[in-house]
Each structure stands twice: as structure tokens, then as C-alpha cells.
Amino acid sequence: MAKTGFYSASMKQTFCDELATRYGTQVSRTDVLKFATEKGFPPPYWFVNDKARSIGRGLFRTDSSSAGAPVELTPELFSSNTVQPEAQVALAATVTPIRRNMESMQGVGENLVPERDNTYVEFGDFDKVEKIIRSKIFYPVFITGLSGNGKTLSVEQACAKLGREMIRVNITEETDEDDLVGGYTLMEGNIVYREGPVLTAMRRGAVLILDEVDLNATKIMCLQSIMEGKPYHIKKTGEKVFPAVGFNIFATANTKGKGSEDGRFIGTKVMNEAFLERFPITFEQNYPPEKVELKIILKNMTKFGCMDEKFAANLVKWAGVIRKSFEDGATNEVISTRRLVHIISAFAIFRDRLTAVQICLNRFDTETKNSFFDLYTKVDGEVDPTKKDEPKAEPVVVDDRDNDIPF
């Protein structure tokens, strides 16, 4: 009712009249605050702080003779030092109307169904992911695997295929309860409660992706009840949010929540066992089979207008040899599917196989870079490492919407 956060004289009169109708000539402090919350009024500090109304023992007169001038709710009133514990419950009456006006900022009213990626090829546990999402049964899933093998993309494209809304949250070490569930923030001079992406997904029955979930081991514990499919009680507003049909949680990680002993995924944490136990199943995502990966590379070459079937075949073969060496412990690095797509993008720009391979290997240390590059020149008998390929054509300009790297 009071979206501006203050009481006008007429609002005070209405408040007192309705209070008197329910409680008579006197009312307790607790009942005043509870009544304000129920009616959608802002916290009535002007009422409970009015000494002229006090008749002792936490009781107040309900007449409107002491209504006085409008009292604006300042940020100081929200301080834990100035707001009494019972008044904090009444705070919901102020922030809830504002939050509802901000729903568009939380994605409400927008289409959250991801777009289909024409370069995506289904493989691995995609069919199982699709069945879980299609069922609309709450069934949290943990997906683990090495970087760049399409863990997140599989969930995204399953949602795109089924026309289901999806919200992706990138977890970091600093992600906390306010980032996930929501919290108070200052906007345009007003203190408002802004709902987080987790509650937005719950309300909309959307699929929630907690990406790189193993980067945070403690602060995401605030999701425990939500991980059980139960309603979430917003402590800061008193509201209970029930999950809509179709709401589900997928978590992706490079580890299984036990940390990274080899240091490849620095920053990953040993996760709480109670949190991990709330995932009924875990999918282990591997790199796609050779035929599937070749299809992915060819689709990306078509997308960028740089088709070269021999180059595609050589890249897939080269990556396969390196991955086998990685599994055998002969190297500490690996070429991911995402890295191959990066090479195709570079090839579309520079139109030179070796240039594309070389600049995309520069992220590795010198020894690894040189050994991987040397291996490619042995796999691809058509290239001469002492002489660059001649550009075959000008790069094709593609729509900006197609420039996202799928892995």
C-alpha cells in the first residue's frame, strides 16, 4: 500500500481507525507491528515511538489524535541498532511492494528459455539430462568432468530443446546468500529487498544451474532446504517461497567436491558432505567420442565459413593423442573440445592452420606449447612448420549472436 516508504496524515488516520476497529482503544506493540505487516503498511515507527500514546507495559492508545506530520522512513531506521527485533519482521511490509515492482530486474517477465545452438551435438548423458528436465520432477543432478567438455552446455541445450526456462549462476569463492537468495540493497535512495536468482528460478519453475559449484564450499550451504525441494523461508521479509512445478537444480564442477590434489583446478574446495548428499545422482562427463567431436568441429567450420575437412580431422586426431597421453600421465595438460573450437575461430580469422593452432596453444607453458605444436605438425602432413599456409579467402563476417563459443 505504501510504496513510497512514509505515512501521510490520511494514511495515519486510516491506520489508527483500522487498528481501533480490530483491537479497541488500546493495543500492544507486538500487535501493532503484526497488524502493519498484514495490511501492507510500512513499519509504524511514528506510532510505537509516540510517548503520548504510551500507556505503559508496551500498550498504546489507538486514537488518531497524535497522528502528527508524515514520518519518512530513512536508511537509519533499517540499522540493527535502531530497529527492534519485532520491528524487523514488519520490515517486509515496506520492502515487499518495492520488490514486486522490481521483478523485471530479476528476469520476471522475460523469456529465460535459452536459444538452440546449431553447432551442438548430443552425446554422453544428454538423453538422461533431457529426461530429468522433461519429467519436471525435482531431482538435483551433479555433473563433473574436465574443463571444456560441454557440461553446462548439455543442460542449457536440453532446456532449449524442451522450451524450458533456465537460470545460470556462476559460483565463485565470494558468492554468498545475498547473491543466491537475495538481500537488501540501496537503489535510487531507497533500501529495497532484491530477490536472488535461486528464488526467481523457484517461483518460475525454471532449471537452475550452479556452475563451478566446487569453488564455494560453505556459503552455498544456505541452499540446504532448497536442495531438498522444500519451501524457502526468507528471514529478511518473513515470506515463504514455494518451488513451482518444474524447478530443478543442476550443479557442474571440475571435481567431485573433494578438491583438486594435482592443482589443475586451483581454488576448488572440499565441499560439505551433507550438501553433496542432496544430489541423488552424479554424471561423469567425458570429452565427446571422435566421431561426435569431428561433427562438432565441422558444424563450427560451417558456422564461421571456413570449411576444411582435413584440418578438422587432423585436429580431432591430435586432441585424441594428447588426451591419451594425459590419461597415461605423460603430460599434465589436455586439449579440450572448447580449445578446438577456439582454434576454428582463429582459423576463420587468419585462414592459416598453423597460426590458428599456435596462438591457441600460447596459454600453455613453453615446454607444453612446443611439444603440442610439434605433435600437430606430425599429425598434419600437409603443413610445413617453416612456411605458413597462404590465406585462402577473406574471413566471413557472421552475426554477433553466433559468436558465442559453445563450450
Image (cartoon, rainbow, N blue to C red):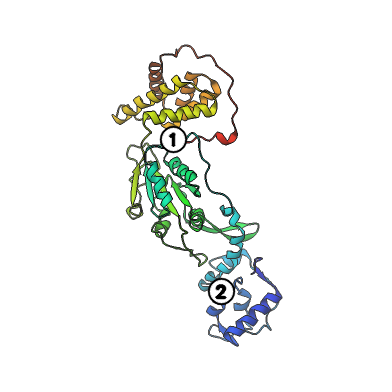
Q: Which residue is mark 2?
A: 38
Q: Nearer the viewer, residue 305 or 226?
A: 305
Would you say residue 33 is visible in this rendering? Answer: yes
Would you say residue 60 is visible in this rendering? Answer: no
On the rendered structure, is 307 left or right of 273? right
Q: Gap in Å between the C-alphas at discs 2 and 1?
A: 53 Å
Name the kind of residue labelled 2 in the image: Glu
Note whether 275 is above or below 407 in the view shown.
below
Mark 2 crowd level (few <14, some 14–19, many ≥20, 10 Å Cα): few
Which badge, 2 or 1, is on the more N-terminal residue?
2
Q: Secondary structure at mark 2?
A: helix
Residue at the outermost left position:
328
CB atoms at circles 2 and 1 under 8 Å apart?
no
Spot occupied by residue 246 in the image (x, y as percentages of width and height): 45, 55
On the rendered structure, is 169 left or right of 330? right
Quadrant location, the N terminus? bottom right
Q: Nearer the viewer, residue 164 or 37?
A: 164
On the rendered structure, is 348 left or right of 297? right
Q: Secondary structure at mark 1?
A: loop
Spot occupied by residue 142 in the image (x, y as percentages of width and height): 37, 47
Mark 1 crowd level (few <14, some 14–19, many ≥20, 10 Å Cα): some
The image quarter containing residue 138 is bottom left
Name the kind of residue labelled 1 in the image: Val
Note whether 369 is above or below 248 in the view shown.
above
Question: How many marks can you see?
Answer: 2
Q: Nearer the viewer, residue 61 or 165?
A: 165
The image's mark for residue 121 is: 1
Image point 56% across, 74% down: which residue? 38
Image point 48% across, 55% down: which residue? 205
On the rendered structure, is 185 left or right of 156? right
Image point 56% across, 75% down: which residue? 33
Spot occupied by residue 355 in the image (x, y as percentages of width and height): 49, 20
